[in-house]
Amino acid sequence: MSRRTRRAAAAAPGPSRPTVSVCRGCCCGTPKIPGVDHAGQLAQLHASLDECATVRAVECLDACEHGNVIVVQPSAEGRRAGGRPVWLGLVNDPAALADITAWAQDGGPGLADPPAILELYVFTPSRRIREGLEGGGKG
């Protein structure tokens, strides 16, 4: 393979993937939210979504009253289809995590409807907080 072919192959975009941002800062992911295996929650997301979504831990999203917070952001394709980030709070049980995983595996916002039960977890943060996610959270 020539250098030119290798460079073109390296630059070829991969499939568009949703991003699952998991708050791990001030309160989320700490003993302040008892009864949750925080490390296990993050590890499960990484293991379950490795092939289809980007999972990242982010600093405090300043929505502590909703801890544990997970934000599911659409892929580029999902955004073109009208998908927008969905903020989920009080994600403290394995069933909610399984529903989030299934939704991301199906394509996430804009490409797949979330399981109906996730409506109970959805909240709308202030614009200031939403914009903080775009910059990687505060920190």
Image (cartoon, grey):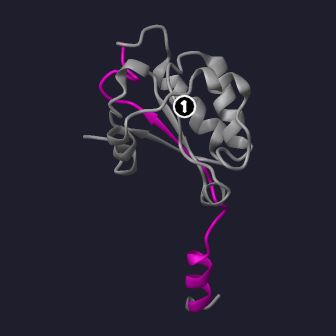
Residue drawn 33% across and 33% down?
Answer: 60
- Whether residue 74 sits left or right of residue 127 in the image: it is right
Residue drawn 47% across and 25% down?
Answer: 39
The magenta span reads 4-31
Residue drawn 36% across and 19% down?
Answer: 30
Give x and y (percent) for residue 136.
Answer: 36, 47
- Mark 1 Cα shell of 10 Å, populated few (<14), some (14-19), many (≥20): few
Give x and y (percent) for residue 27.
Answer: 34, 21
Vertical side of 11 occupied by 63: above or below: above
Image quarter of the N terminus: bottom right
Image quarter of the C terminus: top left
Amino acid marked by disc 1: Ala
Residue drawn 34% across and 44% down?
Answer: 132
Residue at which label 1 appears: 43
Name the residue nearer the viewer: 81 or 115. Answer: 81
Name the residue nearer the viewer: 80 or 15. Answer: 80
- Whether residue 120 sits left or right of residue 124 in the image: it is right
The image quadrant that residue 14 belongs to is bottom right
Vertical side of 130 occupied by 3: above or below: below
- Whether residue 63 sits left or right of residue 119 in the image: it is left
Q: Is residue 58 magenta?
A: no
The image quadrant that residue 28 belongs to is top left
Q: Is residue 15 magenta?
A: yes
Give x and y (percent) for residue 25.
Answer: 33, 29
Give x and y (percent) for residue 36.
Answer: 49, 14
Residue extending farthest top: 35
- What is the number of callouts on the image? 1
Provide the secondary structure element on which disc 1 rests: helix
